[in-house]
Amino acid sequence: MNKVIQLKNTKLPRMLGELTHSNQFLKLFALISLGITVLALIALTVLVTRPPVILTLTPSASLLEKTELPGPENEIKSAIKVYLENRYNWEPANVAAKLKSTESFILPPSIKAFQTSITNVIHFSTEKQVSQKVYPSDFKINLNQKTVFITGDRITTIQGMRAAGILRLELSFESAIRTKENPWGIYITKEREE
């Protein structure tokens, strides 16, 4: 009568418990993964929409200061300075080369007339041993009329004799294509001396 009854535990409740436990673990893992993904997307969006940080350094590795872009007046002034250097600063030995390099500031339809006008200057300079140097002091640029009025000093040397005078020059200009010889794209259309 003393029978020992051994109860067998069914595996189903235990398996259901483990499944529920692993399901909770997977749900928690999925929730944490979703949170990390959302944070990564927010961080990525913030980083992508920000403007880039540009560090400009000088050759000595110091920070380069931010300056304003040059205006058209500065571009015109630097082009006119180069034009004056070639057109009005010459000696008998280099007058032909200097005036030839000035052709890069003349529009192609006007080059023939310009070459005709400078032939007399070249001939006179080499024959009489004339040299000229100008020192511009003031540039008045009128963008509406496309003119530049230049004042300064002019020193002319004829066979060793120097004469100083006042330079008053009005140049009319046009903007056109930029070239290697004329990177400003400023072309002189008319010269008038007072």
Image: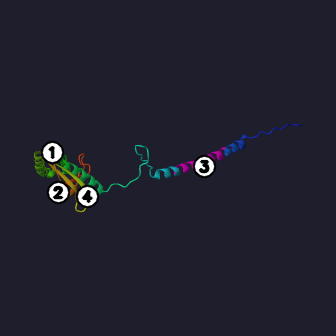
Q: Secondary structure at mark 4?
A: strand
Q: Are marks 3 and 4 in contact (CB under 8 Å)?
A: no
Name the mark nearer the viewer: 3 or 4: 4
Q: Which residue is mark 3?
A: 31
Front one among 190 and 91: 91
Distance from disc 2 to disc 1, alpha carbons, whole Å, reads 25 Å
**Secondary element at image label 2:** strand
- Mark 4 burial class by Cα count in 10 Å: few <14, some 14-19, many 20+: some
From this view, report whether residue 15 is shown above or below residue 65: above
Q: Which residues are magenta?
A: 22-41
Where does residue 12 sit, x and y in percent of width and height? 71, 42
Which of the marked residues, 1 or 3, is nearer the chain's N terminus?
Answer: 3
Query: Which residue is disc 1 drawn over?
Result: 92
Left or right: where does residue 74 sit relative to residue 62?
left
To which residue does mark 2 refer?
190
Of badges 2 and 3, nearer the viewer stands 2
Q: Residue at x 72, y 42 (%)?
A: 14
**CA separation in Å, label 3 and label 4:** 72 Å
Lower sequence index among marks 2 and 1: 1
Query: Which label's residue is closer to the chain start, 2 or 4?
Result: 4
The kind of residue tagged 2 is Lys
- The mark closer to the camera, 2 or 1, is 1
Left or right: 26 as drawn, with respect to 124? right
Magenta stretch mostly in which secondary structure?
helix
Q: Looking at numbered disc 1 in the image, what kind of residue is underneath it?
A: Pro
Query: Does residue 188 belong to the magenta stretch?
Result: no
- Which residue corresponds to the image point at 10% horizontal and 49% vertical from the top-left? 120
- Residue under label 4, please give it: 139
Q: Residue at x 27, y 52 (%)?
A: 78
